[in-house]
Image (cartoon, helix red, strand yellow):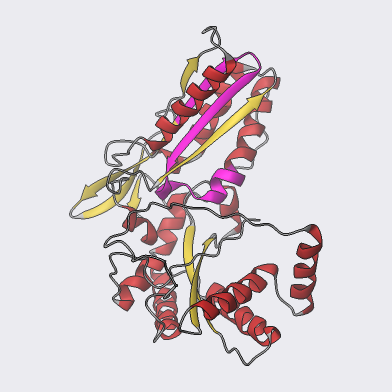
């Protein structure tokens, strides 16, 4: 799967992000991870570690360039990205004030728009608030960094790099044998073309006749266009006993807790909507080769889980159907969601196509 890199086509589901990270002034494609380091830290080692992260992942050094009407990703050389460092430790202000300013500064870095034709898709700021408190704000455009990369791949590599720099030794990190460029090329290869065509045919059959909109009992009409403005968040949790019961049920029926949630949420929604035909969306990380697990990038896709709910059946029946839905969807996971939407001819302006409810489960 290795290719010669420097300039290569975008992966299929990256094409939809385009070069503009704003939606009506809001940075909807911006991601960020402020990492707070408490305790006496070695500032020079910290800066070396951050620079190591910027040099390690070549996807962070890419820009979008247009040639002959097509968008390509141009990889720039190691060292072109630099760490921005600000030392606030001598300001002499109250900690509460410094903390608020640091939060605002990180929010500013994360929210700033990207011009991906000119800018690299990441920013890195290290703030030294005191000898015992540092903040590293790592911001990326969503097209090059998914949640798994930000929460699992990068922190693990960062701490290995920091400890090595502090101890004056080389970091013991696995060599990245497959890069994001290889993944993008594989997805567009001739070998994958036939597979994607077969999977797309399956998705068209799977979603044929599904309701385009889940008619939830809203207390007011949807806006004419999507605004990406949520107004309310409700939080609920499971007790340890409840979670153990969910796991035990899933295992006993040859499934997973996620399948329990698909069945339960589909059943619930079927009781508050006119239809028992429920489609949920779920994001997942798509890394077809084990060597890609150490690579940073946007490997995300969104799957549509369609479950038919029959109120005359038991929950066991519903769970078995949901289990089949999940297994089938993951067996056809390689087609980008955008390709499915285009094939179905859906172009809604005030709701998400195919589904309007997401079920997200983080490990």
Up-down relation of residue 300 to residue 315 (above or below): above
Question: Where does the C terminus fall, quadrant-wise?
Answer: bottom right
**From this viewpoint, is residue 204 visible?**
yes
Please tell me which residue is depicted at 60% across the width and 42% down the height of the picture. 175
Q: Is residue 150 magenta?
A: yes
Residue 258 horizontal/vertical position (percent): 65, 68
Residues 5 and 278: in front is: 278
Up-down relation of residue 123 to residue 290 (above or below): above
Is residue 165 left or right of 190 when viewed as pictured?
Answer: right
Up-down relation of residue 18 to residue 58 (above or below): below
Up-down relation of residue 143 to residue 45 (above or below): below
Q: Toward which corner of the image does residue 309 lie, by quadrant?
A: bottom right
Q: Which residues are magenta?
A: 124-153
Residue extending farthest left: 68
Residue 331 horizontal/vertical position (percent): 55, 75
Q: Is residue 10 magenta?
A: no
Residue extending farthest front: 219
Residue 159 horizontal/vertical position (percent): 65, 32
Is residue 345 left or right of 324 when viewed as pictured?
Answer: left
Please tell me which residue is depicted at 46% across the width and 50% down the height of the picture. 180
**From this viewpoint, is residue 177 visible?**
no
Please tell me which residue is depicted at 27% across the width and 47% down the height of the picture. 24
Q: Toward which corner of the image does residue 338 lie, by quadrant?
A: bottom left
Is residue 42 left or right of 119 when viewed as pictured?
Answer: right
Residue 55 horizontal/vertical position (percent): 49, 33
């Amino acid at each position: 799967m290795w290719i010669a890199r420097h300039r290569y086509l975008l992966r299929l589901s990256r094409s939809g992000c385009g070069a503009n990270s704003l939606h009506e002034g809001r940075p909807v494609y911006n991601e960020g991870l402020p990492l707070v380091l408490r305790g006496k830290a070695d500032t020079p080692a910290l800066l070396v570690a951050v620079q190591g992260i910027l040099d390690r992942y070549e996807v962070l050094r890419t820009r979008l360039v247009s040639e002959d009407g097509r968008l390509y990703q141009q990889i720039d050389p190691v060292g072109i990205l630099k760490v921005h460092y600000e030392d606030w430790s001598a300001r002499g202000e109250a900690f509460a004030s410094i903390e608020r300013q640091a939060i605002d500064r990180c929010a500013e870095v994360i929210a700033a728009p990207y011009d991906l034709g000119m800018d690299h898709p990441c920013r890195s700021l290290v703030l030294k608030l005191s000898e015992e408190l540092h903040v590293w704000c790592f911001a990326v455009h969503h097209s090059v960094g998914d949640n798994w990369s930000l929460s699992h791949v990068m922190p693990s590599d960062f701490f290995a790099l920091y400890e090595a720099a502090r101890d004056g030794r080389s970091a013991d990190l696995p060599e990245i044998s497959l890069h994001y460029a290889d993944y993008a090329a594989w997805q567009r290869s001739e070998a994958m073309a036939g597979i994607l065509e077969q999977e797309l045919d399956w998705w068209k059959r799977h979603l044929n006749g599904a309701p385009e909109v889940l008619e939830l009992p809203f207390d007011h009409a949807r806006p004419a266009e999507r605004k990406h403005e949520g107004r309310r968040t409700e939080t609920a949790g499971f007790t340890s006993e409840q979670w153990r019961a969910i796991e035990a049920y899933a295992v006993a029926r040859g499934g997973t807790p996620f399948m329990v949630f698909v069945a339960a949420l589909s059943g619930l929604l079927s009781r508050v909507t006119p239809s028992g035909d429920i489609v949920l969306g779920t994001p997942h990380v798509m890394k077809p080769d084990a060597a890609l697990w150490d690579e940073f990038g946007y490997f995300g896709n969104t799957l549509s889980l369609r479950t038919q709910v029959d109120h005359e059946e038991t929950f066991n029946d519903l769970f078995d159907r949901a289990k089949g839905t999940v297994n089938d969807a993951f067996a056809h996971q390689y087609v980008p969601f955008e390709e499915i939407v285009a094939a179905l001819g859906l172009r809604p302006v005030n709701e998400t196509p195919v589904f309007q409810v997401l079920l997200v489960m983080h490990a």
